[in-house]
Image (tube, coloured by chain):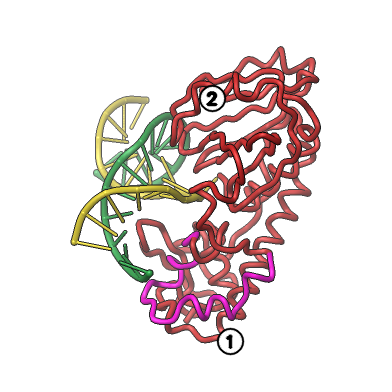
Chain colours: A red, B green, C yellow
Amino acid sequence: MPELPEVETTCRGIEPHLVSHYIANVTVRNAKLRWPIPSDLKETLTGLQIKSVTRRAKYLLLDCGVGTLIMHLGMSGSLRMLAPPLSQQEPPQKHDHFDLTLDDDAILRLKDPRRFGAVLWHIGDIMCHPLLANLGPEPLTTVFNEQLMYEKTRNRRTPIKVLLMDNHVVVGVGNIYANEALFRAGINPKIAAGKIGLARYKKLVQAVKEILVLAIEAGGSSLRDFVNSDGKPGYFQQQYWVYGRVGELCRKCGATIKQIKQGQRSSFYCSNCQR
DNA sequence: CTTTGCACCTGTTGGC
DNA sequence: TGCCAACAGGTGCAAA
């Protein structure tokens, strides 16, 4: 599930239920995520106060003062809040691997069928964590701009679609929105990144920002509340221009949408609109 | 340093 | 209807 808009929506959804609350209990039902959940996490976290809930790339960061809880939803993860007293009546399901119980008996519950997600603990400056230290800029900041893209890509033969999904270049652009942004910018996913000029990068950067903002707004509006909901955000019902539409007709020109593989991921594009 | 491909998992889908 | 291969929203990492 999680593209950046869903992680952002999740972050905003859980934040008000967590901030300033104390952690009363930790339940690990299956520690085998992408990396093992630390075995002493219950002892580490119990009694700590959550100072803030933020996001960096697709990592959710719960600042607990003495350290930070890092959560990642991987490919299939989702978080939801269970409000008391209902939280006691909701039995955990098969893939509910992790619970944080708060001082008001609310529960933050992680579900992750494929277990590509992560729950990690880091002491000290969170931006120094190896997983975060070498990330590119956030897409919705001014640091992500056409000059940066242009300079970063000189002499690079990597296809622009693959490069757009490289976290060292810019974070948070997953497969769906890489495809959609390239369509919006009119750029063929196969073009070598180093052959794209400043003007086209300006269009692409703008397309990425617009696509993400629209999706976050859709997610935020369709998802009334993270409490006791399944947390299915808006982009499930949003319609795509190219993603998943192989063989269908381009909504702009009527040509047939094509599908190719790039870096073991599916790319969708209109060879007429995207050159 | 760049580029490529694999690995980690389970659940769903589509073809035969 | 049943079976099995292919595929799915991510991304760190090893190898070339």
The answer to which of A211 and A14 lies nearer the viewer is A14
Q: Secondary structure at mark 1?
A: helix
> Can you say whether C12 is above or below A251 in the image?
above
The percent position of residue A120, horizontal first and vertical second, equals 54, 35
**Residue A160 in view here:** yes
- Judge the density around disc 2: few (<14), some (14-19), many (≥20) Cα neighbours within 10 Å: many
Callout 2 amino acid:
His
The percent position of residue A194, horizontal first and vertical second, equals 42, 81
- Judge the density around disc 1: few (<14), some (14-19), many (≥20) Cα neighbours within 10 Å: few
The percent position of residue A236, horizontal first and vertical second, equals 62, 48
Residue in the picture at 53% in, 58% down: A135
Q: Report whether A22 appears left or right of A59.
A: right
The answer to which of A145 and A275 lies nearer the viewer is A145
> Can you say whether A22 is above or below A199 in the image?
above
Instruction: Point out which mark residue A266 bears.
Output: none
Q: Pointer 2: what residue?
A: A97
Answer whether residue A201 is magenta in the image: no
Callout 1 amino acid:
Ala
Q: Pointer 1: what residue?
A: A199
Q: Report whether A264 appears left or right of A212.
A: left
Residue in the picture at 53% in, 71% down: A182
Chain under numbered label 2: A
Answer whether residue A151 is magenta in the image: yes
Write down the region rendered in magenta: A141-167
